Image (cartoon, grey):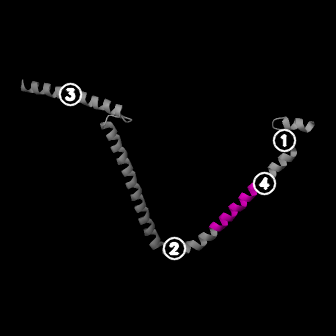
């Protein structure tokens, strides 16, 4: 009965469960530490082997890596510009056909403001022209 009451209290666990949890945590943590050490050792060994090869072949590898990276960046930029162009053309098509794509209201407001300012400037120019002629 006392064990049943202990298991029902929040935060209280039987000692056997605490031991199992601690053992599992130590085992998992120890395994990860061993894997970490093995990975570090393998990295050091491979770098020791690879460094002389990289030094010997660097006159070939460095320009090749630069060329490949420039080609890759060019293809990625080309694809990005293509997607941006198709998106812009799709938006313009939707705007022209009257479907009101996102942002078309702002474009209409800007167009109206520009038309009003253009009319004001035309009127001012006509007034200035009349003043100069008179």
Closer to the eye: label 3 or 2 = 3
Quadrant housing residue 75: bottom left
Q: Is residue 45 left or right of residue 65?
A: right
Closer to the eye: label 4 or 1 = 1
SS assignment at label 2 = helix
Whichever of labels 4 and 2 marks the residue nearer the N terminus, that label is 4
- Image coordinates of residue 38 in percent, x first then y, are 69, 65
Q: Is residue 115 magenta?
A: no
Magenta segment: 26-43
SS assignment at label 4 = helix
Whichever of labels 4 and 1 marks the residue nearer the N terminus, that label is 1
SS assignment at label 1 = loop
Whichever of labels 4 and 3 marks the residue nearer the N terminus, that label is 4
SS assignment at label 3 = helix
Q: CA distance from mark 4 to mark 3?
A: 80 Å
Which residue does the numbered mark 2 point to in the structure image?
A: 55
Quadrant assignment for the C terminus = top left
Whichever of labels 3 and 1 marks the residue nearer the N terminus, that label is 1
Which residue does the numbered mark 4 point to in the structure image?
A: 26
Closer to the eye: label 2 or 1 = 1
Residue 23 vs 62, above or below: the answer is: above
Any mark on residue 13, and which? 1
Q: Main secondary structure of the magenta part?
A: helix
Q: Residue at x 20, y 27 (%)?
A: 119
Q: Residue at x 66, y 64 (%)?
A: 39
Q: Is residue 57 left or right of residue 78?
A: right
């Amino acid at each position: 009965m006392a064990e049943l009451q202990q298991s029902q209290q929040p935060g209280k666990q039987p000692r056997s469960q605490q031991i199992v949890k601690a053992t599992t945590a130590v085992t998992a943590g120890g395994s990860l530490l061993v894997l970490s050490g093995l990975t570090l050792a393998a990295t050091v060994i491979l770098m020791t082997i690879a460094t002389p090869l990289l030094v010997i072949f660097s006159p070939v590898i460095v320009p090749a890596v630069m060329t490949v990276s420039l080609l890759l960046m060019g293809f990625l930029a080309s694809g990005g510009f293509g997607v941006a162009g198709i998106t812009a053309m799709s938006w313009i098509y939707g705007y022209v056909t009257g479907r009101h794509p996102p942002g078309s209201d702002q474009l209409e407001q800007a167009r109206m403001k520009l038309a009003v300012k253009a009319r004001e400037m035309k009127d001012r120019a006509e007034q200035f022209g009349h003043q100069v002629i008179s």
